[in-house]
Image (tube, rainbow, N blue to C red):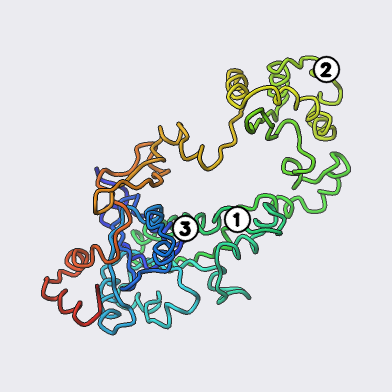
């Protein structure tokens, strides 16, 4: 079945997480993604996974791609990459700033012979501003986007590589938008994606505080807390937006509206609190949050997670178990939506991978394979993209340009 980007060719020059997430999203939409790596040990992520004896992790971000081993520092290899770029629709890189220019494979250079090329460049801080040119990783983007402070207070590293993966998704969005624009103009463009920009774009607390401005002082006088801490103050949780401790885990519960709040009280047998002036309106439930939590905690502490979810869900109240790593990797909803799926590697071994969140629960295409081995498709890609013969490819191999 045809997919949105069938016929689009993508050269993935990136490594680690952000660039591979971008090209993975494009592959999921049907693009022919060729992962370019240096011969020998491959990209740094592959090397690390090999050293950790955790090669299967590579398939988390590289299933459905083809692998090309090419030495870009070899003159023949660099020339070959330029020829491939001339046939590409999209190039993805997350090199350290200045690397692409030094290698002669930056957007300004490639567009001279391929003006239709869309060049996706993912960096920590983008092409402009006082931090342009600085090298960055996920932790740097989360720190400078304010996300790390909001999540950990800045005292410990983030628990997930959120900035990398989210930036990759936005880079894919930028690539698709640029391809759409190319249909109108006939020209490609540089997609300048800064990870700090993406992190801040998702920092609702900081954005809301900036928008609220000095009016936050009035909110604090009225409710006893500012807008930023309204629902997220770990030391002063509110009873209507809370992770409640059950006998065997935690359950998140939302009861924002008066109807939801009263329904929650009825469901747990605390009808006596419905007329309580402390909780009769939303501001009171904020001001008297500690008292509300103390009143509701005992019911949750007497029930299992499953009992709480079943009881509250039956009344239409938003709630869910807090899933740990093992539980989320076995979640029945994710399984039903084919987000927990498998692909086979070249030997026929199945590897657990994530599905496609844009597939509408349809899962990955049947032909999808695991992360390609280093240079697994070198000859195939050079034949498909450049019409090179086996003799041509053998000659390039002898010169050390490809492997």
Q: Is residue 335 above or below residue 215?
A: above
Disc 2 to disc 3: CB gap under 8 Å: no
105 lies above or below 87? below
Horizontal and vertical percent position of residue 201: 60, 55
In this picture, residue 289 sits left or right of residue 65? right
**Which residue is at a point 20% across and 68% down the rendered structure image?**
382
Give the camera-side residue of 349 and 121.
349
Of the numbered discs 2 and 3, the one sitting upstream in the chain is 3
| Quarter of the image where the N terminus is located | top left
Measured in 3D between alpha carbons, the distance from the residue under mark 2 to the one under mark 3, in whole angstroms, is 50 Å
The quadrant holding residue 230 is top right
Q: Nearer the viewer, residue 351 or 177?
A: 351
Q: Nearer the viewer, mark 3 or mark 1?
A: 3
x%, y% of residue 286?
A: 80, 34
Residue underneath mark 2 = 275
Q: Nearer the viewer, residue 47 or 188?
A: 47
Residue annotated with mark 3? 168
- Can residue 189 be seen in the rendering of this structure? no
Q: Secondary structure at mark 2?
A: loop
Q: Residues within 10 Å of mark 1 (few under 14, many from 20)?
A: few
Kindly report the distance in space between the C-alpha atoms of the residues bearing marks 3 and 1.
14 Å
The numbered mark at residue 201 is 1
Point out the image quarter for the C terminus: bottom left
Could you tell me how many numbered marks the image carries? 3
Percent x, y for residue 108? 40, 77
Q: Secondary structure at mark 3?
A: helix
Q: Is residue 349 left or right of residue 23?
A: left
Q: Residues within 10 Å of mark 3 (few under 14, many from 20)?
A: many
Q: Secondary structure at mark 1?
A: helix
- Upstream in sequence: badge 3 or badge 1: 3
- The image quadrant that residue 11 belongs to is bottom left
Residue 178 occupies quadrant: bottom left
């Amino acid at each position: 079945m045809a997919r949105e980007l069938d016929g689009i060719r993508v050269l993935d020059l990136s490594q680690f997480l952000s660039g591979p997430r971008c090209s993975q999203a494009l592959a999921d939409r049907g693009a022919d993604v060729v992962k370019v790596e240096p011969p020998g040990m491959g990209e740094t992520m592959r090397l690390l996974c090999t050293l950790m004896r955790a090669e299967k992790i590579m398939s988390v971000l590289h299933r459905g791609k083809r692998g090309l081993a090419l030495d870009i520092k070899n003159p023949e290899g660099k020339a070959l990459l330029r020829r491939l770029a001339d046939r590409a629709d999209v190039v993805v890189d997350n090199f350290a700033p200045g690397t692409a220019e030094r290698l002669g494979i930056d957007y300004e250079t490639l567009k001279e012979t391929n003006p239709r090329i869309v060049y996706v460049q993912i960096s920590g801080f983008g092409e402009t501003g006082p931090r342009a040119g600085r090298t960055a990783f996920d932790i740097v983007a989360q720190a400078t986007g304010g996300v790390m402070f909001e999540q950990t207070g800045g005292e410990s590293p983030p628990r997930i590589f959120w900035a990398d993966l989210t930036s990759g998704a936005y880079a894919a969005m930028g690539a698709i938008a640029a391809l759409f624009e190319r249909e109108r103009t006939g020209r490609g463009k540089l997609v300048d994606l800064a990870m700090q920009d993406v992190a801040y774009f998702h920092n609702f607390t900081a954005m809301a505080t900036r928008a609220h401005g000095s009016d936050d002082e009035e909110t604090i006088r009225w409710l006893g807390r500012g807008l930023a801490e309204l629902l997220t103050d770990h030391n002063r949780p509110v009873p209507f937006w809370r992770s409640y401790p059950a006998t065997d885990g935690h359950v998140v519960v939302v009861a924002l509206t008066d109807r939801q709040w009263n329904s929650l009280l009825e469901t747990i047998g605390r009808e006596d609190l419905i007329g309580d002036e402390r909780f009769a309106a939303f501001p009171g439930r904020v001001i008297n949050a500690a008292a509300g939590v103390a009143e509701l905690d005992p019911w949750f502490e007497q029930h299992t997670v499953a009992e709480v979810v079943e009881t509250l869900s039956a009344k239409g109240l938003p709630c869910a178990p807090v899933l740990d790593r093992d539980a989320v990797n076995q979640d029945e909803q994710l399984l039903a939506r084919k987000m927990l799926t498998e692909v086979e590697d070249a030997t026929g071994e199945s590897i657990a991978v994530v599905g496609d969140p844009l597939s509408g629960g349809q899962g990955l295409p049947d032909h999808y394979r695991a992360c390609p081995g280093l240079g697994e498709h070198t000859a195939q890609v050079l034949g498909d993209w450049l019409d090179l013969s086996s003799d041509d490819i053998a000659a390039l191999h002898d010169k050390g340009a490809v492997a």
